[in-house]
Image (cartoon, rainbow, N blue to C red):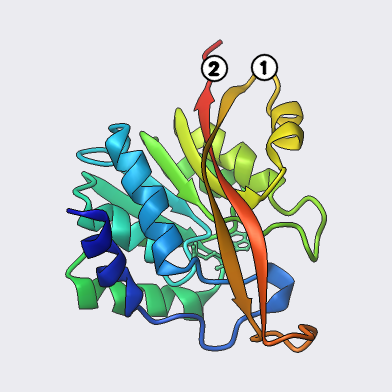
Amino acid sequence: MRLRTLEMALEGLEGFGRPDPRIEQYVTPAPLAARLLHHAHLLGDIEGKRVCDLGCGTGILACGAALLGAGRVTGVELDPDALAAAKRNAARLGAEITLVRGDVRDPGLVGGLGSFDTVVMNPPFGAQDPHADRPFVDAALALAPVVYGIFNAGSLPFLGAYTEGRAELGFAIAGTLPLKRTLPFHRREVVEIEVEVVRMRRLSG
Ligand code: SAH
């Protein structure tokens, strides 16, 4: 599937009904979601692979992975309303995904998910809770040898230090997240924040 075709398929998906600022619910825009998935696909990390979307929200990354021919896709999410939207989105696209309600910080949940080839995620950036992305990084590296995550631009050095000895990191793509004024504390209508997609490869041993 071409990048533009994937982007168009993801464009019309439903977002969060009532986004909750405490858990940083922002939908990844279709162009960025499509570029992340397309990039991962070109590197052989999607087609026929077991893919897990951590904090899948309304399911844009999970659905996109399924459209690109992932062998099996599992989305994990805390919020039941987001999961219901993800289910509707998957049905709309005819994408087969498994949805699991759970907390990424719960080692029991992560241990019970099985293993995957690739994790894709747009974790909380830590605007509310400074280290909110860390349990996502830990869970992702426990679940799969390859991880694609969206982080604030400039996160690579911090991520490198945090995953030292556990993963090899590479910058994958740059993008912006236009955060709409969906949350009461936002002062402007749209705030563009610079982000980067980081690819992590788990080091064995
Ligand atoms: N992956 C989606 C949503 C990104 S927003 C997308 O790309 O559009 C981050 C998501 O992580 C939100 O849906 C939020 O509800 C979820 N989340 C935050 N903390 C979580 C946790 N501890 N366990 C599971 N999901 C969590």
Locate residue 151, reporting x and y percent. 63, 50
Figure quarter occupied by ligand 1: bottom right
Q: CA distance from mark 1 to mark 2?
A: 7 Å
Name the residue: 72% across, 43% down: 154
Compare marks 1 and 2 and give the one earlier in the sequence. 1
Q: Nearer the viewer, residue 141 or 64?
A: 64
Locate residue 188, reporting x and y percent. 74, 85
The C terminus - image quarter: top right
Residue at which label 1 appears: 165
Name the residue: 78% across, 50% down: 131
The disc label shown at residue 201, or none: none
Name the image quarter holding residue 42: top left
Locate residue 125, reporting x and y percent. 70, 57
> Tag 1, which secondary structure?
loop
Q: Please rate how many residues cluster around mark 2, counting C-alpha atoms within 10 Å: few if below 14, some from 14 to 19, many from 20.
A: some
Report whether 124 appears left or right of 199.
Answer: right
> Tag 2, which secondary structure?
loop
Q: Nearer the viewer, residue 22 or 35?
A: 35
Q: Amino acid at mark 1?
A: Gly
Report whether 185 appears left or right of 120.
Answer: right
Whether residues under marks 1 and 2 lie with C-beta atoms below 8 angstroms apart, the answer is yes
User: Is residue 172 depicted above or below 79 in this figure?
Assistant: above
Name the residue: 39% across, 66% down: 60
Q: Nearer the viewer, residue 167 or 191?
A: 191
Report if the beta carbon of the residue with label 1 is closer than 8 angstroms to ligand 1.
no
User: Is residue 109 depicted above or below 201 in this figure?
Assistant: below
The disc label shown at residue 203, or none: 2
Q: Amino acid at mark 2?
A: Leu
Q: Is residue 105 visible?
A: no
Name the image quarter holding residue 5: bottom left
Name the residue: 26% across, 61% down: 4
User: Is residue 124 depicted above or below 167 in this figure?
Assistant: below
